[in-house]
Image: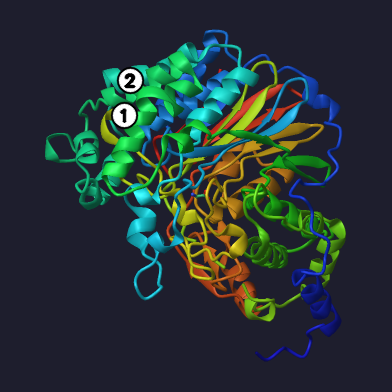
Amino acid sequence: MKLSGSWNVRALALSLLFTGASAFAFADGAPRTTPKPAPAAVAQKPGHAAIASANFLATEAGFEVLSKGGNAFDAAIAVASTLSVVEPESSGIGGGFMGVLRTAGGHESFIDARETAPAAVNPKDYLNADGTPNRDTSLNGPLSAGIPGEPAGLVLLAQKYGKLPLTVSLAPAIHAARDGFKPDPRLRGSIAERVKDLNRWPASAAKFLPGGKPPAEGELWRDPNQARTLEALAAHGLAGFYQGETAEALVKAVKAAGGDWTLKDLATYRAKERTPVAVDYHGYHIVTAPPPSSGGVAIAEILNILSGFDLAGLDEAHRTHLVIEAMRRAFRDHNDYLGDPDFVKMPLDMLLSPYYADGLRQSILPDKATPSSMLPAVSARDPGMHTTHFSIIDKDGNMIGITTTVNYILGSTFVAGDTGVLLNDEMDDFALVPNMPNVYGLLGSKANAPEPGKRPLSSMSPSLVLGKDRSAVIGSPGGSTIITQVLEGILAFVDGKSATGIAAQKRYHHQFLPDRVDVEDGVFDAATADALKRMGYDLHPREPWGYMNVVTWDHQTNALDAASDPRRPSGLGKVQ
Ligand code: GLY
């Protein structure tokens, strides 16, 4: 690789030193940024509520539960469980979620309801005879599924943060599953896209292909089996899903189809509360996702790098250049170091340190792209339709953002017997073959290798942005693009954009490898695009990606705002 004459060798050496960093003291997995006291203004009560989700039925379910005396956390249970019924292509009780929350009293926490590998996980199940990845076993059927985390996460939310029993907060989802709803074009299209795989398993075909084909436009679609499973969860909490009849049916169906789950895998699953990653940027306090998500660490690293630049004083091309270079450096670290904090020690002190960011900042040239091949080697994803995010602020000022997933579209496509539970295919988020990309092109290291009980690395990055004048809850689906979408959302919010402006703004994305900038049509004007190309960027047009759902709170006027991404029609951001 040839270097341009202007390359600053000292800066490169510094960057290599920091990014090569095995000599640094490793942390125990807990983020060590010092939490700052919350801005005083956040303690106000808005007096009304805002919910933005990817499906209007889910948003309305949240308001229904608020009207019954619930708070934002009860509403989150209603939204997530209703999405499990009406948007099963993206998330559900057979999958897992990550959520960031702040109570009206100022307590911040992170709920990790990520799936775990079953005790019998065998990495060889995901390899072909020649050692290449077997994408069928990692993406389809019971071997691709981790032990679901969403039901346990909802129980944790209800028990620790909610005001209502699960019988009330799960009622809208049970109602939608039992009495039916009209699937939107995206769900009908997702089913049509995966007909072949759904037909491999009788319970999947029975659920998603009534009469042998996807539900037709305007047809009422019912899911009585899922309604029964949700009722058991409502009545018995954790035991209603992870023990007893539901657990037995899940294990039986998985084993019969070639998977290897045990009752113990289910009975021992627990959602966990973790300390969120926190970073300050231009007067805002950002609270975001810790490992086993790579998202918050990457966002914090990028913001730490950018906080040393005067972005507002730059033209768009130079501002974009600096953001892309910060993305490039953060994604490189993501691939190398991160995994489940219960299993791997990660250099989080280093990755989140402003001094580390100083070194990375100095390695950025003012007018030139840094080829990724110049940084220590290590990753990449496709902006998929999977996963979904919703954001809520209630009348008292409780805030929660949840990103939830079954991984790929319709997860594993495997419905477990008569439980109605569509299982995830989160096993593909492990680095099944070191340095071979997963379905999103993301590479991984040993830190993210599959092990019994381990959680696969995620990109999910639900985030709170807390300021004196304004605060926001931001998140989006989209594989690795989640990280850059949320980052661009935070930057737009800091620049004063409204919820609608943030959700609608055009996107760009760089993830270290492949070394290119994915661009949504219209994101740059012609002059900016030309300037970026002259700096050495490969601008790669691609279809619009993401499905951002944002709520904001103006502390001056106490007004809330909510917006659902205009790229897809079924979402609803509503203030009431
Ligand atoms: N399954 C996508 C993610 O967790 O990032």
x and y percent of residue 62 in the render?
Answer: 50, 20
x and y percent of residue 463 in the render?
Answer: 66, 40
x and y percent of residue 261 in the render?
Answer: 40, 42
Q: How many marks?
A: 2
Residue neighbourhood size for the residue with mark 1, other residues' Cα within 10 Å, grouped as few (<14), some (14–19), many (≥20): many
* Residue 413 is at least partly visible in this image: yes
- Determine the residue positioned at 31% across, 43% down: 255
- Determine the residue positioned at 60% across, 18% down: 159
Q: Is disc 1 in contact with disc 2, using a CB cutoff of under 8 Å?
A: yes
Numbered tag placed on residue 228 in the rendering:
2
Farthest residue, direction top: 68
Pick the front one: 555 or 258: 258
Res. 170 image quadrant: top left
Q: Quadrant of the image for the C terminus?
A: top right
Whichever of labels 1 and 2 marks the residue nearer the N terminus, that label is: 2
- Determine the residue positioned at 48% across, 46% down: 119
* Colouring mode (rainbow / by chain / secondary structure / one colour): rainbow
Numbered tag placed on residue 287 in the rendering:
none
Mark 1 C-beta closer than 8 Å to ligand 1: no
x and y percent of residue 400 in the render?
Answer: 63, 29
Pick the front one: 151 or 15: 151
Dot 1: element = helix
Pick the front one: 548 or 333: 333
Residue neighbourhood size for the residue with mark 2, other residues' Cα within 10 Å, grouped as few (<14), some (14–19), many (≥20): some
Check the image and report above or below for 10 versus 516: below
| Amino acid type at image mark 1 | Thr
| Amino acid type at image mark 2 | Arg
Q: Which residue is mark 1?
A: 419
Dot 2: element = helix
